[in-house]
Image: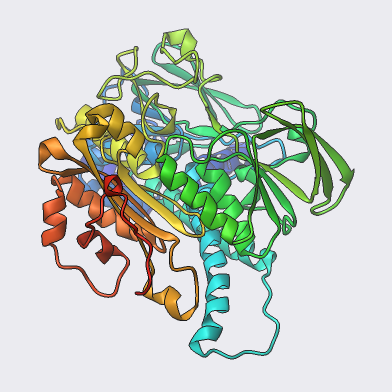
Amino acid sequence: MWTQVKELFSSLGVDCNILELDQVDEGASVQEVLSEITNQRTVPSIFVNKVHVGGCDHTFQAHQSGLLQQLLQQDPAYDYDLIVIGGGSGGLSCAQEAAVLGKKVMLLDFVVPSPRGASWGLGGTCVNVGCIPKKLMHQAALLGQALTDSRKFGWEYSQQVKHSWATMTEAIQSHIGSLSWGHRLALREKAVTYVNSYGEFVEHHKVKATNEKGQEAFYTAAKFVIATGERPRYLGIQGDKEYCITSDDLLSLPCCPGATLVVGASCVALECAGFLAGLGLEVTVMVRSVLLRGFDRDMAERVGASMQQLGVRFLRKFVPVQVQQLEKGLPGRLKVVAKSTEGTETVEGIYNTVLLAVGRDSCTKKLGLEKIGVNISEKTGKILVNDEEQTSVPYVYAVGDVLEGKPRLTPVAVQAGKLLARRLFGGRSEKCDYVNVPTVVFTPLEYGCCGYSEEKASEVYQAENLNVYHTLFWPLEWTVACRDSNTCYAKIICNKLENDRVVGFHVLAPNAGEITQGFATAMKCGLTKQLLGDTIGIHPTCGEVFTTLEITKASGLDITQKGC
């Protein structure tokens, strides 16, 4: 096969250099480094203009697709056309799209371990310690609720049902491993050079890549994309990094966390508190100010109320000032001292685990951005860009959670990365649309939304120009199970001056994410209250409630439900 590859290059008029590893003294060491860089353990390992193509079969496939010829024609002024720093959703999307467009691409990705030692592979926060494991644990908790409901539907079982944390995390981590491996294979198939090293600018158009052994390499590129994301924030109090964990640690924790204090009221805080409670654990949420800052206030409080119904305890207007270890072990015992934000009162509590979910900080401080003049926000550390994701340095771009003022969501980063690559290398002009981005909070009772909150809509359009239609509703599945008839809630915010165009969509319900996704498309198309009313609902579903909304908040009429 190797001779066939030589003949291929010869037919293309290309000289090739051959290093036969079994003929050199340090061949084994070279093979080890090559395996680490390329994840290919067989020979031959073929590189074209510093891009790893793969073995013999991959090289012939690249020739048939035209990719090999494109690599051979690359401009030698720089090592790469594009270097992407960060292997999360946005970085992967951008790197792969640029490679599909025939560009020579490198992706640098390195996960600095958390203070508790957690680290992971390719794929970023979403795949490894975010959306994917979090949704799966949410599902585990929902199955527990389904077991309870099932008795009302006639299921009889006498044996004691219990949950195994170890079984759950092992299965979830196995799935995550397959996703991370899939990303590596996709990079290889598209001839993206993946290097597991920390990228840092040293001068214009040049980065230093440092691997876990401290070995350094230097690469140059015509363009760069920063997609380094964020990591959880610590409180800076005694014992936080020593004894507390964050979402970076929880979702792969080897032992059941036991009685847990969740510090914070963000999406991450409430989602984690929710599934832990759903698994039968004692959970307390310590809230400094408000729940789900940035979301609709009414909806945020309804989320909190629904969690209280499930047994989650909320300790409001307190912040921790000290964490002490009382007992070592898995999970051990911790004492937390907290102080009121409204006075001098202090409280103490004993927990097995303390989970910090008080926000996230952008990973921009150690990238050498100041050496080349990339502007970042002094307050947030986030990167400032124009409407084409271009920074203050023309050849440097950024996507994902590192951007100032943009939604911090995986699908947003994926879309932005793909469209950026197409504009840079494909002659396209489409920009990422950051307006009306749907999202969901995966609390036990999910909260989905798209568009403006009531507060933001009032600020943009003025309250007197808005109609807010709303109702409580009772999912059919909850009736036989005797679950509360007035917890689920639907609301739309309409702009009177635009024929009651829907500018805000909110739902608190089972599977709210699935409901919201479809309505988000309708909002992109200019959905109005009239169009909703003209739509025939699917019965019996939760989503159909939006086709029958009639009561406005301003009317003050009763929206409680008496039946299905």
Point out residue 324 in the picture as x, y percentages from the top left corner.
84, 37
- What residue lies at 20% left-to-right and 30% top-to-bottom? 423
Q: In this view of the protein, which residue sits in the foreground, 356 or 394? A: 356
| Left or right of 31 in this view: 427 | left
Above/below status of 523 relative to 230: below
Instruction: Count the numbered circles shown.
Output: 0
- What residue lies at 42% left-to-right and 8% top-to-bottom? 373
Q: In this view of the protein, which residue sits in the foreground, 434 or 133? A: 434
Q: Is residue 510 visible?
A: yes
| Left or right of 251 in this view: 497 | left
Above/below status of 284 relative to 140: above
Point out residue 427 in the picture as x, y percentages from the top left corner.
14, 30
- What residue lies at 43% left-to-right and 16% top-to-bottom? 206
Q: In this view of the protein, which residue sits in the foreground, 447 or 214? A: 447
**The C terminus, quarter of image:** bottom left
Point out residue 401 in the picture as x, y percentages from the top left corner.
43, 32
Q: Is residue 104 visible?
A: no
Above/below status of 249 relative to 345: below
| Left or right of 303 in this view: 284 | right
Quadrant in which residue 357 is drawn: top right
Point out residue 75 in the picture as x, y percentages from the top left corner.
26, 22
The color scheme shown is rainbow
Furthest-right residue in this view: 327
Quadrant in which residue 226 is drawn: top left
**The N terminus, quarter of image:** bottom left
